[in-house]
Amino acid sequence: MSRKPLKVSGLIQSGRLVPQAGITASTAFDTPAESPAAEIRQDQPAEVAYNAQPANTPAVVAPVNALGVEKLIDLDLLDDSPFQTRLKYDPERIDEISQSFLSAGQSTPITARQMPNGRYEIIKGQTRKKAAINIGWKQARVLVVSRTDREAELDVMVDNTGAPPTEYEEALMFRKAMSKEYATTQKAVAAMFLVSQAKVSNGLAMLNLPAEVLSLLDEEPGLFGAHAAKVIHSLWETYPTHHHVILKAIQRLKEGADQGSIQVWVTQQINAASRPPRAQKHLIPSSSGAPRYLTQAKDRDIIVRISDRSIDAAMVHQKIDEMLRKMADEVTE
């Protein structure tokens, strides 16, 4: 789990702290203090506060400072960021924020930038938007900031004010940070996201899993973490003819199986499949139900045991020979 981010923007701006080489400075955590003029009254019922302005004409509440302007904006004008690497949102987390909105109002505005088409692209607060929609709000407080595409992408990546991302989602962020040269080394990526370099290395290793496995993570990012990914990668290389068993083991995680059980379960399944089949036994009784013969087949051997001592073994042997000769002629023909 990522460590709690430290707000260092003021130190950087004052010249008391210099960003580490290889990292682009971000203003993602520069949330300005709200002035009394910009504050939406929290003593009003939430529905009254957010429907105070016409739904089709978001009104400027008040300029906050040079960082942006806070407005009431229609939720249907807010678009999710195309730079967002989060694949899924926790419905329980959305419900929690919804309840908070109903009881205390929206204390923190969504951060967004205005696009040339007049719509707004969210930089921080996708979960807040979903929570507002969840309870039927039509508008929300939005801090509108000026960002280039590159600045917006960086701000989206380093924003971890909401629920923590899964290890797979983090890995996607690490890769993007390096591919876009926001950070050029794993060490720089670690400093950028305030995590250990080992976490970055393990996360990037997850992205080397086979495509069949990555597709499962795309569907359910929290299915397993970096440690289980190492186990899966090792099993995939060790058992090249049993990939279907490994995929089945991963599917079991959706049913509640523990990540730590993957290796043991796969090994057990492969060993069981490689064992020779057990000998098959058939009891042949008389019409009255009394046991007469017991046959046992194992591999290419068939054993006949005479259970009834009154039966002549030589006669049985002769009958079996006759049957086999007849079968031999049928195979020849």
Image (cartoon, rainbow, N blue to C red):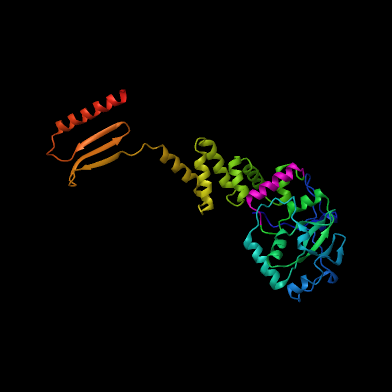
Residue farthest to the left?
A: 310
Where does the C terminus fall, quadrant-wise?
top left
Which range of residues does the magenta coloring cover? 164-181
On the rendered structure, is 23 left or right of 331? right
Query: Residue at the location (74% across, 72% down)?
Result: 47
| Image location of residue 243, percent across then percent down | 52, 39
**Residue with the most extreme top position:** 332
Q: Is residue 281 left or right of residue 198?
A: left
Which residue in the rendered view is the most extreme toward the bottom? 43
* Image location (x, y in percent) of residue 11: 82, 56
Quarter of the image with the N terminus is bottom right
Q: Nearer the viewer, residue 98 or 108?
A: 98
- For the image shown, how many numbered marks are present on the structure? 0
Q: Is residue 51 above or below residue 228?
A: below
Q: Main secondary structure of the magenta part?
A: helix
- State which quadrant residue 324 falls in: top left
Relative depth, front residue between 264 and 3: 264
The percent position of residue 225, horizontal first and vertical second, equals: 59, 49
Q: Residue at x 31, y 23 (%)?
A: 332
Report if residue 179 lies within the magenta region.
yes
Measured along the vertical axis of the image, is residue 60 above or below residue 17?
below
Percent x, y of residue 112: 79, 58
Residue found 54% across the figure and 39% down from its top: 234
Vertical order, 287 against 239 (above or below): below
Question: Residue at left 68%, top 69%?
Answer: 100
In depth, the one of 284 and 307 nearer the eye is 284
> Is residue 128 magenta-colored?
no
